[in-house]
Amino acid sequence: MEYVVLYSLREGADRARLLEVYPRHKAYYEQFHADGGGLIALGPFQPPDPTAGSMGIFTTHEAAERFITSDPFVLEGLATPRILEWNSVHLT
């Protein structure tokens, strides 16, 4: 079982502010991953989707919660996260 965090942009969020905050977000997710935080992958959808702008995949619900509690995008009110349990099928 894995967990997906879907981020949607908050209504009225300034997209220019996303670019300003992104370097802190990037430094945060890189350190979270390097520390063994349970982050498998993350990134935005292309083309951008207003209801789910980006997503992250985590090994546990706790890891997903830990991530969103300190993510600059969330802390600065730019994104609204939601955690979904993902019953992924791994093909070998």
Image (spheres, grey):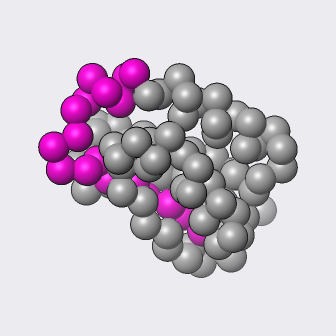
Quarter that holds the N terminus: bottom right
Residue at the image point whose x is 34% and y is 43% from the top: 78
Q: Residue at x 31, y 27 (%)?
A: 17
Q: What span is in magenta?
A: 3-20
- Residue located at (58% from left, 50% from top): 70
Q: Position of residue 54 (x, y in %)?
A: 42, 47
Q: Was residue 14 drawn as part of the magenta stretch in this picture? A: yes
Q: Is residue 22 above or below residue 76?
A: above
Of residues 70 and 60, the one drawn nearer to the viewer in this rendering = 70
Marker count (numbered):
0
How far across and how far down the image is residue 45, in percent? 38, 42
Q: Is 48 on the left or on the right of 27, as rendered?
A: left
Report the quarter where the C terminus lies.
Answer: bottom right
Using the rendered view, name the quadrant where residue 34 is placed: top right
Q: Residue furthest left?
A: 12
- Whether residue 69 is situated above or below residue 49 in the rendered picture: below
Residue in the image at 49% along x and 69% along y: 83
Asked whether 53 falls inside the magenta stretch, the response is: no
Question: Residue 44 versus residue 11: which sits nearer the camera?
Answer: 11
11 to the left or right of 74: left
Q: Residue furthest front?
A: 76
In this rendering, position of residue 23 left or right of residue 13 = right
Is 20 above or below relative to 33?
Answer: above
Residue 89 seen by the camera = no
Query: Residue 87, can we see it?
Result: yes
Percent position (x, y) of residue 3?
A: 60, 68
State the image coordinates of residue 7 (x, y, percent, origin top left). Answer: 40, 53
